Image (cartoon, rainbow, N blue to C red):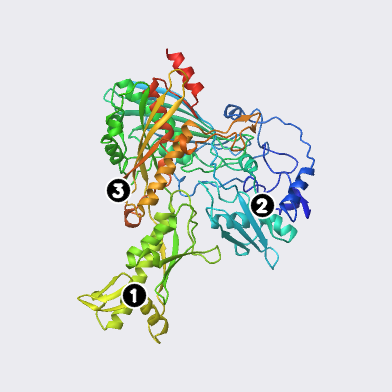
Amino acid sequence: MTAVLRGPDLDRGRVAHSRPSLLLAGDEVVFAGQPVAVVVATSEAAASDGAALLDVEYEALDSVDSLEGAETDEVMVWPHGTPTAASSQAGLHGAETSSSDSGSASNVDERRVFERGDVEGALSGAHVVIDRTYRNARVHQAYLEPHAVVAVPGVRPGEVTVHTSTQGQYVVRAEVAGALGLRERDVKVVPMTVGGGFGAKYGILDALVAATALHVRAPVRMVLSRTEDMLTTTPTPETSIRVRLGVDAEGRVSALDVRAVIDNGVFRFGHAGIVATVIGGMYRCEHVRIETVEVLTNRAPVGAYRAPGVPQALFALESSVDEAARALGLDPLEFRLLNAVDGGDLTGTGRPWPDIGLRACLERVREHPLWRSRGSVPFEGVGLAVGGWPGGFSPAGAVCRVDSDGTVRLHVGSVDISGVHSSMVLIVAETLGVRPEDVEIVQGTTDSGPYAPASGGSQVTISLGGAVLDASRQVREQLRDLAAAHFEAHRDDVELEEGRARVRGVPAREVTFGQLAQLGERLPGGPGPVVAEGRASLKGGAPGFTAQLVRVRVDPDTGVVTPLEAVAVQDVGFAINPLLVEGQMHGGTAQGLSFGLYEGLRYEGGSVTTANFLEYVFPRALDLPTLEAVMVERPSEHGPFGARIVGEPPITAGAAAIANAIRDAAGVRVTALPVTSEMVWTLMRQEA
């Protein structure tokens, strides 16, 4: 064994808590699963044996274990004030709000109100009011690869290189440098291949491992076991959302009143803005009030999971919308079309949507055979729900060059977690007129790669794609200039195709891109090598919307719900890589269904009782229904070639569609997720 380290050994005095497991617990452990010591050894077996020898004595303290207990402030998670916390989703929480965070010690970390119109007056005058409260359990991202980090100290004191499975290398660099009091130039991050992230791979362990490596002056590797991962890392929050939805006699939404209580665990996060944006931004409504209450509990801190907060919000909203349509005797699809937002309509935070495709998705659903054939089999039902995601966007850079052998190399600083780099290859190939196999991606580190946004928020294609398009267009013009000089022709007469330059109308005269690159590299006094740096900074995003159908069978004797078929219709703007887009739609749809029917962390006395893949339930391949992806292509103003965000929208509607399908099949309304057979059986007996 090399060392046994506790919190004071690694606390470099800069930040008390920047990430959940950044520093080890001191005298008090604030959630079950918080690390208390690090054992460093020359082998995994020796480290495991050393950890087994540690004897930690715990004294049980009063704790906050529920949403209801958090709001009372009878027991305080942080009696002396909340420490620094995990960051919010950049670019998604800037809406105008009123905040009532007093700054004093409280388990209510933040209370925000988004309001317009006269909600109570509109509710009192509504023809139908649906008033229900919906709850969601915490859901883990359940990636196949647990968190893994290697940190190597540099030659000079304070220098460290971090090899990590991460979605955002620049995020990790800032976290490690800030937490350990280092300069960012002294922290090099090397992003490794990611075995699943879904919003959870943003540097939870990296600063802890870097601090350990700097302390022992040797390379250190930490790989969490599955149980450690599920106890310590950042699942979705548990939520309780009350929705009061008012509708007039003609079927128009007249009032929306929402109170969403969000369990952030022991640290701050920031789901409020996106929850409010979406829950109040799917249907046109003049009178809206959305109150978000983010509370702290003695549970592991929460984080992002593919469209964070939106599946929970839309389960509540879409269930209420479905009930309102039924109360009025209206077709649920036509009711949604009557009220659906369009470009220029307001989100829940009061900002207008750009051009969006929600109505186009609903119109495509209207034509689908599954919707047309619903209601034909007893105890089978079809549920409809809509979803969407505003999408992040960030500045980005990219470097494109042509080598003397004709290879086009694209240098990026992004992390490829879903095959998104293949789309960058296609952008370059289309712009330059080369085969995709002649384009090579070079993924840089924080030292060598051009700046790129983190791979989250569905922002990489629209943000990085613009920089790639800019760089490749510049390279195209450089090639045309070189070819024009070579042929002694006007540049407007030069055509680029299949990796060659030709003079229009003279097909026999051609030169390869490799030969042009050689001219640029060798011609004295010439234009120089074929290389360009592209930059992009979008003024707006490219939101993606979806409408989903799910067909289920409900066993009347047991309450067991079997999903039979799922259809996801999504506005993708322009599918740069259709196979990749379809895969994202399938994956997100499957996760949305799992959110509704299977997944939920269980707690007893503040401790997770489902901290492994034997206990934590999620669907196997055979548990999923047939999945169909239908793409609607309404080009976006901002995305490259009109592309829209793709990754987040497909998870947002599945849980709500499941609930609405159960209502259609069995006549009962579920108000908690995940749905269990016991829950459905009990509701059916109550209705009988």
Lateral position of residue 140 relative to residue 298, left or right: left
Secondary structure under the numbered disc 2 in the rendered image: strand
Q: Is residue 214 above or below residue 22?
A: below
Image quadrant holding the C terminus, namely top left
Q: Amino acid at mark 1?
A: Leu
The residue pinned by badge 1 equals 479
Foreground tag (2 vs 1): 2
The residue pinned by badge 2 equals 222
Q: Is residue 105 above or below residue 393?
A: above
Q: In the current view of this chain or complex, which residue is farthest to the front?
A: 622
Query: Mark 2 or 1 closer to N-term?
Result: 2
Q: CA distance from mark 3 to mark 1?
A: 32 Å
| Residue 563, image x, y percentages | 42, 31
The answer to the question of whether label 3 and label 1 lie on touching residues, with beta carbons closer than 8 A, is no
Q: Name the mark on residue 633.
A: 3
Q: CA distance from mark 2 to mark 1?
A: 48 Å
Foreground tag (2 vs 3): 2
